[in-house]
Amino acid sequence: MNEIEEFERAVDLLAGKRSYVSTELINKLIAVFRDNELVKEKAAEDVISFSDREIEVLGLVCKGLSTKEIADKLFISSRTVEKHRANLMTKTDAKNIIEVIIYAVKHKLIDL
């Protein structure tokens, strides 16, 4: 549709008290929607996969439990808890457990 036809269409619609949205605007909205979907897909790919046990350990760390307290609560050794914490830090490329907690909060992995 050329510009004159677009203008005539707009006048006809508006004269009939109907809404008008330009083809150009519709195309831009479609492009924005497509881009938004790509961003969502990329974000979903960026979410790291954690084991159920790692999430469980993370939740207890967030509640302030020590390694020993977590081990006792989960019936595992302190060394196993330390390994889960190390895995969490490796997977999130964190320098410390606080950065892991921040990652978890940002990605809604835990409820505080």
Image (tube, rainbow, N blue to C red):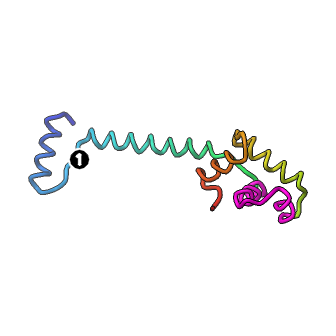
The span picked out in magenta is: 52-74
Q: Is residue 76 left or right of residue 106?
A: right
Front-lying residue, 52 or 7:
52
- Residue positioned 75% across, 47% down in the render: 88
- Residue positioned 89% across, 60% down in the render: 76
- Residue positioned 61% across, 43% down in the render: 45
**Residue found farthest to the top:** 2
Q: Which amino acid type corresponds to the residue marked 1 in the rendered image?
A: Val
The image quarter containing residue 56 is bottom right
Front-lying residue, 87 or 78:
78
Residue matched to label 1 = 21
Front-lying residue, 79 or 14:
79
Q: Is residue 87 magenta?
A: no
Dominant SS of magenta comes to: helix
Give percent across and percent down for residue 27.
32, 40
Give percent across and percent down for residue 82.
84, 50
**Residue found farthest to the left:** 15
Front-lying residue, 49 or 59:
59
Give percent across and percent down for residue 100.
69, 47
Q: Is residue 19 left or right of residue 89?
A: left
Image quarter of the C terminus: bottom right
Assess disc 1: are there few (<14), some (14-19) or many (≥20) residues with their C-alpha within 10 Å of its C-alpha: few
- Residue positioned 70% across, 39% down in the render: 93
Image quarter of the N terminus: top left
Q: Is residue 63 magenta?
A: yes
